[in-house]
Image (tube, rainbow, N blue to C red):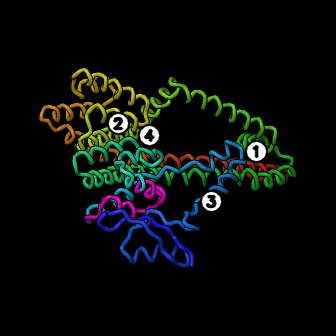
Amino acid sequence: MPQFAYKARRRSGEMVQGLLEVPDRAAALVQMERLGLFPIAVDAAKGGAVAKAERPQRSSTARTALLPPALRELLHRKRKPKLQELATFTQQLANLLHSGMPLTLALNSMTHLESKGVPPEVSKQLRQDVTEGKSLSDAMGRQPHVFSDLYINMVRAGEQSGALEDVLRRLASHYERFAEVQSKFLSALIYPTIVACVGVIIAIFFMTFMLPRFLEIFKGFQVPLPAATQLLVNISNFFSNWANWLWMLSVIVVGFIIFMRFKATDAGIRRIDGCKMNAPIIGKVVRLNLFAQFSRTLATLLINGVPVLTALKITEQVIPNRIMRDAIARTREEVTDGKTIAQPLARSKIFPQLMIDLLQIGEETGDVPGALQNVAETYENELTIALRVMTNLIEPALIIVMAVGVGFLLFSVLSAMFSITSSINMNR
């Protein structure tokens, strides 16, 4: 019967190793579970030497090595988990620690739990690193595609303060809030997107299938077409010509390349981010989201004991808007010189006065994290209202545009039919 060499930990955390005579690896895992062991490594043993379990993976890696570098990089690219997926993973780990389970055993259990978006390999690697003596924050730092600087620094603060479970719960709550805001924003765009797509499909169907049939009828009567109908015919002829499509596609491709190159420059990024913040209707939503994200992130870091300068640096990296990031960077430089946070934020002329006033009160009372939490809740509530207002404005605007478009199509066809009818009556 085959032998399997294993390394495992007892419930007490003691490391053990040995051999099991079982039919296959699955049976070895079942046997270890009956013995109350938590497996770390289980490999087939042949002649006293452990056979490498990674051989199939190596052969697959060798096959992918023959692919072009760009395609190979695409195949090996790891997907970053969504906010809600990361929140679920964090909450599950906090629950295991709350049950009294040691960290290594909790990480081992995480490999068997359903955690969408965070593959079991992440927990396995974390468990292995922690078993080898690394801290959880250092182990997470080796997987930047999953854990951000915000996550790692908060976990490190929780380890230093001995409140890792509480920190994980705060982290889960933090990501759940941002996931909720993201979900509200996407939900607000679903209906307008559907309406716009339906409008485009109707226009294409009419111009492609309906209009040519009407034109065949009009040609038989030799009647001059009304101006609206002639305009519609010219538009249809333009889009029926493949050369025009190629020309438009070329213009779109060139414009896209120019835009992407402009976006890659610092000046381009700042210009685009500035336009997002000042755009009509959607600009207010963007600003409120940025204010809430800044306040919530900085408050979460400070509550968990992260130093002010480190917290500002991490918040700067988290914020996606370059203009606001520059303002946070200048604030961090001035705070280094011993100044408060509120004063340099006020001088940036980006942050609203309400945020500055609440932050100053928090600095005077010694409760900056609490003040930032109040600011975050205030702007998250305003963001919910702004999203609802934006949706209420966009929906009727799209309906009006569709009504005008459909009305123009009907008017163009009906006016031509009336011209034909009038011509027939005059010839009688």
Is 102 within the magenta? yes
Nearest to N terminus: mark 4 or mark 1: 1
Which of 90 and 426 lies nearest the eye of the viewer? 90
Are the two marked residues, 1 and 2, in contact with CB atoms closer than 8 angstroms?
no
Q: Distance between the residues labelled 4 and 3?
A: 53 Å
| Residue 55 numbered tag | 3
Nearest to N terminus: mark 2 or mark 4: 4
| Amino acid type, mark 3 | Arg
- Where disc 1 sits, the SS reads helix
Q: In this view, does 140 lie above or below 100?
A: above
Which of 407 and 89 lies nearest the eye of the viewer? 89
* Quadrant of image for the C terminus: bottom right
Pointer 2 residue: 315
Pointer 1 residue: 236
The residue sitting at 29% across, 64% down in the picture is 101
Span highlighted in magenta in the image: 100-127
Q: Distance between the residues labelled 1 and 2?
A: 52 Å
- From the viewer's perspective, is the residue at label 2 or at label 4 nearer? 2
Give residue 63's position: percent from left, percent from top: 70, 53
Is 400 within the magenta? no
The residue sitting at 44% across, 77% down in the picture is 31
